[in-house]
């Protein structure tokens, strides 16, 4: 499903991460803090560090990826879950 996203004014020190999964409505965590459900757009992430992005849903094994956002860019990551 296509969506139009209006991004705020771009700043070189912030980036955006688009999180996709093979399981819709799974919980998304950034550094163990809940931020939403898949699919999920993470915005205004400072680019000076790496983040652990984890996807969890009951009945599935959780999965995670480490990501370092790029300034003024939107990156897409896919984190697929496997059933228990």
Image (cartoon, rainbow, N blue to C red):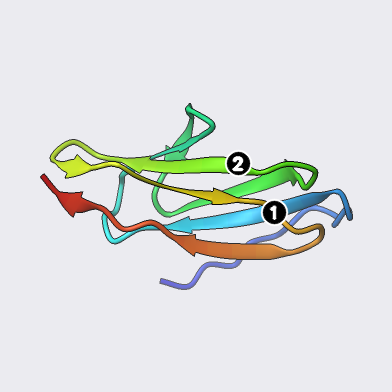
Element type where label 2 sits in the image: strand
Residues at circles 1 and 2 in contact by the CB criterion of under 8 Å: yes
Q: Quadrant of residue 39?
A: bottom left
Q: Residue furthest top?
A: 33
Element type where label 1 sits in the image: loop
Q: Is residue 15 left or right of residue 66?
A: right
Q: Residue at x 67, y 51 (%)?
A: 68
The residue tagged 1 is 69
Q: Position of residue 37 (x, y in %)?
A: 40, 43
The residue tagged 2 is 51
Q: CA distance from mark 1 to mark 2?
A: 8 Å
Image quarter where the N terminus lies is: bottom left
On screen, residue 72 above or below 31: below
- Most foreground residue, 44 or 32: 32
Q: Residue at x 75, y 59 (%)?
A: 70
Disc ID at residue 23:
none
Q: Position of residue 8 (x, y in %)?
A: 79, 53
Q: Residue furthest bottom?
A: 2
Q: Position of residue 14 (x, y in %)?
A: 80, 49
Classify mark 2: residues with Cα within 10 Å, few (<14), some (14-19) or many (20+): some
Q: Quadrant of residue 4?
A: bottom right
Classify mark 1: residues with Cα within 10 Å, few (<14), some (14-19) or many (20+): many
Q: Is residue 22 left or right of residue 10?
A: left
């Amino acid at each position: 499903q296509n969506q139009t996203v209006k991004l705020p004014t771009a700043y070189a020190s912030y980036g955006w991460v688009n999180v996709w999964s093979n399981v819709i409505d799974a919980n998304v965590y950034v550094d163990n803090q809940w931020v939403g459900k898949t699919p999920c757009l993470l915005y205004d992430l400072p680019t000076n560090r790496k983040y652990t992005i984890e996807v969890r849903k009951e009945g599935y094994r959780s999965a995670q990826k480490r990501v370092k956002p790029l300034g003024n860019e939107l990156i897409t990551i896919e984190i697929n879950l496997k059933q228990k």
